[in-house]
Image (cartoon, rainbow, N blue to C red):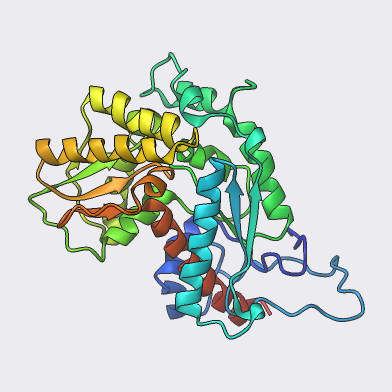
Amino acid sequence: MQARVVPWGPALQLSNDDIYPILEKTWEKNLDLGSTFREGSSPKRLRTEDIDTAQVPLPPCVNFVPVGVVGGMGPEATLDLTQKLFKTAKEVGDPKSDQDHMQVITMNIPNLIKDRTAYLNSFTGDRSNPDEWRAHLLKNDPNNPYHGSLAVAQACVAAGAHFLIFPCNTFHAYHGVLSEKLKVPLLHIAEATMWALRKHNLDPDKSVGLLATSGTIDSKLYQTTATRMEQYGCPRIKWALPSPTSQKEHVMAGIYEGVKFGDMEKGTELLDQAVQELTKDHALSAVVEGCTEIPLALKDKDYGDIKLIDPTQSLAEMAVEFSRNLARLETKFAR
């Protein structure tokens, strides 16, 4: 049986299969819960006898359970996600003291995690071949961000994170292979975005624009995720992408030569041009800011009836909801 690593660590052994039963609260309808909430199974609790609680027992997690932010991709996006976590949790949790706030374990270690887009785009094989693509994701290459991110993620788990989130859209190409190595659920930023879109009344006759790195665009992260999330009542999306010229000169330059380089004014100008071009070429109901640097640049922009969808905010909202629901679950079944 798996052991808890620290007193505030996970009390139940869960996986990615448990994310939506917890979010949708279907676990409340069946008292006989298991690691995947199947009928007839029993809760998989984690051992606690190896934990030293010293002289005074530490208080349990009540309103929330700790989330781990695997940061450094990029550093400012990590801080942005962390701030949005606290703000969202404060709005829904109405804390009256320091102890009432959400627990967040953030590790912002950018030197360990290499550039995601550069490495993904270095692939020369057949991306439709899952074995070749998987081999590239796991390759023992110093430029592969997988190895550093795994080390940071494992450190978050060792520090007591009950589940993990990642402040980089492009990095979610690694979501599947990382899930195999980690013993806690990993929320998915594109899934969170589709989950959030359920509350927007999008015009089905209009498209949704997507601004993202070339790595995210080429991996079809949002396109495939949107199709997968239709089973949870998420809207069917017709995507509109920037032209190749705009993708290079506006989107990628705005992200790398603007925001990441520290020139926010340039980033805002170029990314705004990318949105303007999309609106000229397509009838849009919304634009997904599919790189965590983009909301930093466009936070003060208003495009009228066209909604800007911030995946960082969507991920923060899902993380807060998951944390609260999991806290109730652990209180009910693992104490």
- Can residue 254 be seen here? yes
In the rendered view, tell whether residue 310 sits above or below residue 318: above
Question: Does the rendering let one see residue 186?
Answer: no
Q: Which one is nearer the viewer's eye here, 232 or 301? A: 301
Q: Quadrant of residue 143?
A: top right
Residue at image position (30%, 30%) is 250
Q: Is residue 266 left or right of residue 241?
A: right
Judged from this view, the residue extending furthest toward the top is 124
Q: Look at the picture and state if 288 lies above or below 20.
A: above
Vertical placement of residue 19 versus 57, above or below: above
Would residue 203 appear left or right of 92 to someone viewing this image? Answer: left
**Location of the N terminus (image quadrant):** bottom right
Q: State the image coordinates of residue 271 (x, y, percent, origin top left).
A: 30, 38
Which residue, as the protein is rendered here, is positioned at the far right? 55
Q: Where residue 191 sits in the image (x, y, percent)?
A: 38, 52
- The percent coordinates of residue 25 (x first, y second) are 43, 74
Q: Is residue 28 above or below residue 149?
A: below
Identified at 43% across, 68% down, the residue is 23
Residue 335 percent across, percent down from the top left: 69, 80
Residue 127, by quadrant, is top left
* Residue ID at (49%, 38%): 171
**Residue at the farthest bottom position:** 96
Q: Nearer the viewer, residue 16 or 238?
A: 238
Q: Is residue 250 left or right of residue 90?
A: left
The number of numbered discs placed on residues in the rendered structure image is: 0
